[in-house]
Amino acid sequence: MLKAHTYNDHGHSPAADSLTLTYEARFLRRKVLTTDGGAQVLVDLPQTTSLNHGGRLPTETGEIEILAAPEPLLEVTGDHLLRLAWHIGNRHMPCQIEGARLLIQQDHVIRDMLEKLGASLRDVTEPFTPEGGAYGHGRTHSHAH
């Protein structure tokens, strides 16, 4: 079994293998995972870490690249996208911010709120790579934490 004790936000050479994980699964400290190539790897980090898309776990046989898995999301668009983003952020929802849309995790309460605010909503399945915490790293958490 491979072992990974450190995490790097990026790599400089081709990765030996990859791990495709959902947003929730990319938040861990210690866990045995199966790479996309079928290898078992024990991730044993010093602290709970948010593994970002493109990050790397160095192992004794090379780096394993972290990939964001497609997952069910809610695409948010509308004429007042900044206002919608403010309401999402005010509820501490992880949010992927793009030029003409926002992506958030499925939540029926937030969906109802956004509909009442006039948002256009569409269910999509895509990789989820939301913005980091207040200082550009870490995670935001919904009130369900």
Image (cartoon, helix red, strand yellow):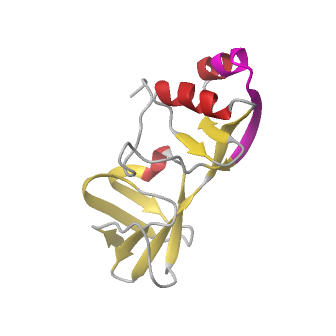
- Which quadrant would residue 102 be assigned to in this image? top right
Q: Is residue 80 above or below residue 75?
A: above
Front residue of 18 and 130: 130
Q: Which residue is found at the position 58% from the left and 45% from the top?
A: 96
Is 9 included in the stretch rendered in magenta? no
Quadrant of the rendering where the N terminus is positioned: bottom left
Front residue of 17 and 47: 47
| 83 left or right, relative to 125 | left
| 81 left or right, relative to 142 | right
Quadrant of the rendering where the C terminus is positioned: top left
Q: Is residue 135 above or below residue 43?
A: above
- Tell me how many marks there are: 0
Picture coordinates of residue 94, whole percent (x, y): 50, 38
Question: Which segment did they paint magenta?
Answer: 113-125
Q: Which residue is found at the position 60% from the left and 22% from the top?
A: 110
Picture coordinates of residue 27, whole percent (x, y): 40, 48
Q: Is residue 51 above or below residue 82?
A: below
Picture coordinates of residue 38, whole percent (x, y): 53, 70
Q: Is residue 100 above or below residue 45?
A: above
| 113 left or right, relative to 57 | right
Q: Which residue is found at the position 49% from the left and 70% from the top?
A: 65
Picture coordinates of residue 137, whole percent (x, y): 37, 52
Is 115 included in the stretch rendered in magenta? yes
